[in-house]
Each structure stands twice: as C-alpha cells, then as structure tokens.
Amino acid sequence: LMEVPIRTRAGTVVGMMLVRRTAGKPPFTDEDRQAGEAFATQAAIAIENAGFYVELEQKNAEIAASLQEIERLYAVEQG
C-alpha cells in the first residue's frame, strides 16, 4: 500500500491518495512513488481550482446583484 498526501501549494493536506499493489507483485519503486506524488499534486491543483471556481461564481452573483440595485436606483432617480 502506498499512501500519498494531497497537499495544496500552501502545504495543507486536503486528502490522501491510497494505492494498492496487486498481491504477489513487487513492492512500489521510487519511480512509482514519484508518479504517485505527481498525480497527487495534480489532484491538489484540481481541488484548489474547483474552490476558486465556486468563489468566482459567488463573486459574480454578488456583482450581478449590485448592478441590478444600481440600475434600480438609477431608474428611480430618473423617474
């Protein structure tokens, strides 16, 4: 069993990747470990990007609501 932490760029562990080796197969090599770490790094980037996407959608919704309020206030002032 190979356990590889999934860490953000800041070093925070956001998950753990567990890789099992089929019974009777040789143990994991250093190359296997490096490949696992590279995959875990990519997973961490994807997790962070998903969080950024959610934040961006929230900000866009706030901006859209602000714009609607500004347009409403402008219409009242013009009316």
Image: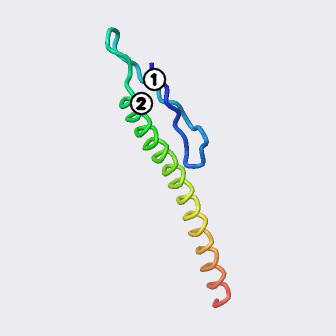
Q: Callout 2, which amino acid?
A: Arg
**Closest to the observer, 72 or 70:** 70
- Is 9 on the left-hand or right-hand side of 42? right
Mark 2 vs mark 1: in front:
2
Question: At 58% across and 63% down in the image, what residue appears?
Answer: 59
The answer to whether residue 18 is above or below residue 5 is above
**Closest to the observer, 17 or 31:** 31
The residue furthest front is 30
The residue furthest top is 24
* Crowd around label 2: few <14 · some 14–19 · many ≥20 (10 Å): some
* Mark 1, secondary structure of its residue: strand
- Is 25 on the left-hand or right-hand side of 38? left
* Mark 2, secondary structure of its residue: helix
Q: Position of residue 76 (x, y in %)?
A: 66, 84
Q: Position of residue 49 (x, y in %)?
A: 49, 51
- Is 74 on the left-hand or right-hand side of 46? right
The answer to whether residue 56 is above or below residue 43 is below
Q: Callout 1, which amino acid?
A: Met
Residue topped by disc 2: 33
The answer to whether residue 26 is above or below residue 33 is above
Give the mark nearer the N terminus: 2 vs 1: 1
Image quadrant containing the C terminus: bottom right
**Closest to the observer, 8 or 50:** 8
Rendered image: mark on residue 2: 1
**Closest to the observer, 58 or 38:** 38
| Quarter of the figure with residue 27 | top left
Q: Are marks 2 and 1 in contact (CB under 8 Å)?
A: yes
Measured in 3D between alpha carbons, the distance from the residue under mark 2 to the one under mark 1, in whole angstroms, is 8 Å
* Crowd around label 1: few <14 · some 14–19 · many ≥20 (10 Å): few
Question: At 37% across and 29% down in the image, what residue appears?
Answer: 32
The residue furthest left is 25
Q: Position of residue 65 (x, y in %)?
A: 60, 68
